[in-house]
Amino acid sequence: MENNIQKTARLTGLLYLLVIICAGFAQGYVRGTLVIPNDANATLTNILNAHFLFRFGLVADLVAFMLDAVISILLFQLLKDTNKTIAMVSSAFRLIAHPAIASINLVNHYMALKVTEGNVASSELAGTVMDFMTAHTTGYLIAGAFFGVHCLLLGILLYKSGYFPSILGILMVLAAGGYLIETFGNFLFPGNEMLLATIVGISAAIGEITLTFYLLIAGTRKQLLN
């Protein structure tokens, strides 16, 4: 029993690390460097000059979201003994956030790429590409709301489980706050995108990376499973 739980915890950590790498590459590097807010022409130029990189970013995101489906189930297995209902709801919100909403949202990323094929650069084409990327950003924010609720419930489970240090639960609750603040802040108070992105970037990075490496290295508190 102890062996199985430790293996599940470390597998979860490994997959979570791969998700962070893939999603960080797609959002932070690919879209973060190629898509220039409020500059459609520069965005179009960047995508045309880095066609394969933009395409590879989509694939990296898709891989991350597929892995997230597995992580959702593994987290449920790890935490169902703490509170089965909350663990189930938490995993459901994660499944809706990335494997569902964020995966479908990749159609906007793909269409931004597709419309450039065989077309000459123009202001009209640049506007179309930017419209698709704006739609992608909106979809990303909607997924973030569901993921924020997942992080909140996950934080509560981690805090109460006894299998993990309570600080992990606290950090995940803070990460949840970051995701929820970014999503609802952007919708309710537009114009603060950079500030909100910084808030979620810091809170999510601290919470999720700490949890990832704890799972990968320590697994769970063995003594509580004897």
Image: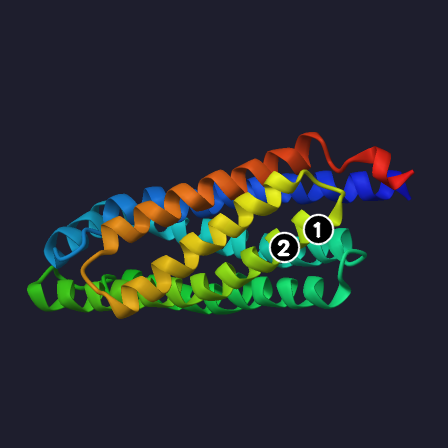
Residue 204 to residue 110: above or below: above
In the image, residue 48 lies at what x, y percent? Answer: 21, 51
Q: Secondary structure at mark 2?
A: helix
Left or right of residue 205: residue 69 = right
Q: CA distance from mark 1 to mark 2?
A: 6 Å
Quarter of the figure that contains the N terminus: top right
Q: Specify how the rendered protein is coloured.
A: rainbow
Residue 211 can be seen in this image: yes
Residue 110 can be seen in this image: no
Name, please, the residue furthest toward the left.
123
- Tell me the amino acid under the disc marked 1: Lys
Q: Which residue in the structure is indicated by mark 2?
A: 156
Left or right of residue 83: residue 152 = left
In the image, residue 120 lies at what x, y percent? Answer: 13, 61
Label 1 close to label 2 by CB (< 8 Å): yes
Mark 1, other Cα within 10 Å: few <14 / some 14–19 / many ≥20 = some
Q: Which residue in the structure is indicated by mark 1?
A: 160
- Tell me the amino acid under the disc marked 2: Ile
